[in-house]
Image (cartoon, coloured by chain):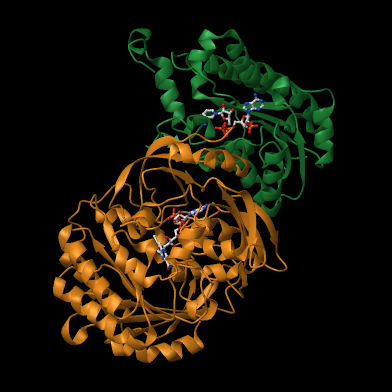
Amino acid sequence: MSAPFVSQSYRSWGGVTRTARPVAHPKWRQELAGLLGGARDRGDVLGVGLGRSYGDSGLDAGGRLICGRGLDRFMAFDPQTGVLRAEAGASLDDILQLVAPRGWFLPTTPGTRFVTLGGAVANDVHGKNHHRAGSFGLHVRRLGLIRSDRGALELSREQEPQLFFATLGGLGLTGFIAWVELQLAPTPSSFLDQEAIGFSGLDGYFDLLADSHDRFEHVAAWIDCSATGGGLGRGVMFRANWSAEGGLVTHERRLKLTLPLEAPGWVLNRWSVGAFNSLYYSVHGSRHGLRRIPYAAGFYPLDAIGGWNRLYGRAGFFQHQSVIPEGVAREAVRKMLERISASGQGSFLAVLKSFGGKDSGGLVSFPRPGASLALDFPNRGAETLDLLDRLDAIVADAGGRIYPAKDGRMSAAMFQQGYPRWRALEALRDPSFQSAFWRRVTQS
Amino acid sequence: MKSSNAAPMGVIILGASSAIAEAVARRLATKGVRLGLVARDAVKLAAIGDDLRIRGAPQIAVRAWDLAAGPAPGALAELAQEMGGADTVLIAYGLLGDQALAEADGAAALELLQVNFTSAVSWALESSRVLATICGAHGLVVGLGSVAGDRGRKSNFVYGAAKGGLALALQGMAHRSALTGAPRGMVVKLGFVDTPMTAGFKKGGPLWSTPDQAAAAIVQAMARPKAIVYAPWFWRWIALIIRLLPEAVFNRADL
Ligand SMILES: Cc1cc2nc3c(=O)[nH]c(=O)nc-3n(C[C@H](O)[C@H](O)[C@H](O)COP(=O)(O)OP(=O)(O)OC[C@H]3O[C@@H](n4cnc5c(N)ncnc54)[C@H](O)[C@@H]3O)c2cc1C
Ligand SMILES: NC(=O)c1ccc[n+]([C@@H]2O[C@H](COP(=O)([O-])OP(=O)(O)OC[C@H]3O[C@@H](n4cnc5c(N)ncnc54)[C@H](OP(=O)(O)O)[C@@H]3O)[C@@H](O)[C@H]2O)c1
């Protein structure tokens, strides 16, 4: 017997759309075939994980959702080689609890540990070490995929490579990911030696970059979006290497604080956002020294506050993350910051990173060499959508693209020009799988 | 084998494929407890066993048995031996069923009683016999009960009656242990837990717990057993209020 589909209210991380959806929560791999079987008659399905994608790539297109989170068992782990096989609903949080004390770590990690293996594969996620490690998919050795038309398949670079690469960054469209086999990376300790360096403008960021990428594994910068004029693009670069000392320990699982309720919409306004950013700059902007910090503080600062997305209130918020090819990155990022500053809609958190040349082979994977700016904006309706369209135009002019995991509104043209290989993914899509995002950017 | 207030060393779980039981087993595995896993589905058992081994269980023995049929002579003792000794048995399997169906169809009612009461009590007695030979009064038989067993009500009284009956048997074993030194009995009465058993329910809100929250309370209770434990703790007070409500008031509530 398979888990039933039960109507439940469901939202993605940005919370702009929320509706009641039929969702099934299987606990066993053997239930999956039954949930896909007959999908044709009952409408499309989409597999989802922890719902950390911001927009509509993790929402169904009027069909049903299969939440994989209950499939969270470890299947095999070799502490000698660091090869881990786990069901796709296991979260990075679960995995770190197991492997960090044994001297292993995720080869690369997004800014939250509350994502599932399935979600990490489907968005081919990246971390602050892209210049060294590339994206998540590069470290996936094999995976189990269940398709409505072909049943259970095992995929690797040798076994059905086309479908394997289509599934890396495949936005969950090639079938349901049942399990993933991952090559972990060894770590000398569970601590990072992190340095914070302030810079007074965008040129400062790019000047620091080459040296930082040469000498540090983890590099990312926070940009002060409240700064204007001469201060435009000022920020703080955080760069870190694994510490040789501190020992092997896992993170504290309990959250420091959880927001139980949706905050009123006015909490994040122009002044509070500006004040936060100025304060942050004055605290970190001048600090240079090395600090040893636990990995959770380095990689997952936002995870300390459960449900922080509720700060944005009922209307929710949008993310905008772009990547701009190297040669033109500086100019395009500057134009975007000027646009935001002129609009008066401050971004609470703005993060600037630079990707390297390692390519996972995913057909619509987001990362490519260049600079990546991530922004978030409270949803103020037309005014916000208009700003985001203008940012898109700057990205498109520079030959860049937008991250689907963070998007809920880019135009079909914007998507298709950024991901010329999208038709190859469409050809390998499981005919019973569809997402609201994919329908929007390919069928309009 | 262990003192009366200590974490268990070897735990047999009857109904190891239950979501709550699996969460308990994970917590025990990471503490290095030996495990005996019993459920009716061998494929599920294999998946759970692999996972628990990776999480740190030093020894695991599995059996695919039809638990609702009750114990076969000698089988449980043999399982305890294979896993290197046991001091605790957790009876976790259970069936919520469908109250309306149980009222309409005698076979459905009998199945609910057979799974949740008749077989469960006979497993509790068999567990007590087996643990008595291994560790005497340090043995502990734990059953997963329900607040539904505290007062009969319209929506689930067949299930409730079975769970209430199981609770009485375990309470009796606790009493017997205090007087004779036989293995102890404990019932952990759960409130609303988000598991496949409650898949059709509308969930969310402060009364619902995750399987892991329920498991934390169960593991904690195993280290300091009492005849009756509510998990999470606040259900003790909710159940008390429900039991104390005068009939005239209770009968107006559609529960
Ligand atoms: C605070 C925060 C920081 C973040 N930082 C980063 C970052 O630094 N880098 C980065 O790359 N991303 C980042 N993200 C985005 C996040 O990593 C991705 O959105 C990730 O895919 C979310 O995984 P999830 O388990 O929540 O999946 P969901 O959001 O539920 O789903 C994501 C996609 O995976 C698919 N999917 C999920 N499970 C399955 C399955 N079993 N089978 C098939 N398809 C499946 C879905 O269909 C969907 O397309 C961040 C998100 C947050 C909230
Ligand atoms: N969830 C709650 O809100 C709640 C509340 C109060 C009490 N409880 C009790 O907690 C215990 C665990 O439940 P759960 O919530 O974890 O549910 P669950 O995940 O649905 O597990 C139910 C378990 O019972 C087994 N089972 C069901 N019918 C059976 C039968 N006829 N013969 C043998 N085994 C059978 C199942 O085996 P298969 O895997 O083979 O199907 C499974 O192991 C149960 O005793 C339940 O009554 C739960």
Give x and y (percent) for residue B151.
47, 15
Give the image location of residue B210, x and y in percent: 49, 40
- Please tell me in which quadrant of the rendered image residue B241 appears: top left
Q: Position of residue B8 (x, y in %)?
A: 69, 41
Q: Which residue is rendered at x = 36% and y = 88% of the image?
A: A327
Q: Is residue A70 above or below residue A291?
A: above
Query: In the figure, is residue B214 to the left or right of B116?
Result: left
Residue A436 appears anywhere in the view: yes
- Tally of numbered tags: 0
Is A324 above or below relative to B152?
below
Chain letter for the part of the structure drawn in orange: A
Residue drawn 77% across and 47% down? B59
Dividing the picture into quadrants, the one containing residue B105 is top right
A157 or A111, which is in the foreground? A157
The residue lying toward the viewer, choosing from A154 and B191, is A154
Q: Nearer the viewer, residue B206 or B101?
A: B101
Picture layout, residue A367 above or below residue A1: below
* Placement of the C terminus of chain A among the 4 image quadrants: bottom left
Ligand 1 resides in the quarter of the picture at bottom left
Name the residue nearer the viewer: A271 or A74.
Answer: A74
Q: Could you tell whether B3 is left or right of A221 in the image?
A: right
Q: Position of residue A238 (x, y in %)?
A: 40, 79
Looking at the rendering, in which quadrant would you find the N terminus of chain A?
top right
Color used for chain B?
green
Q: Is residue A93 visible?
A: no
Q: Quadrant of residue B19?
A: top right
Q: Is residue A180 above or below residue B17?
A: below
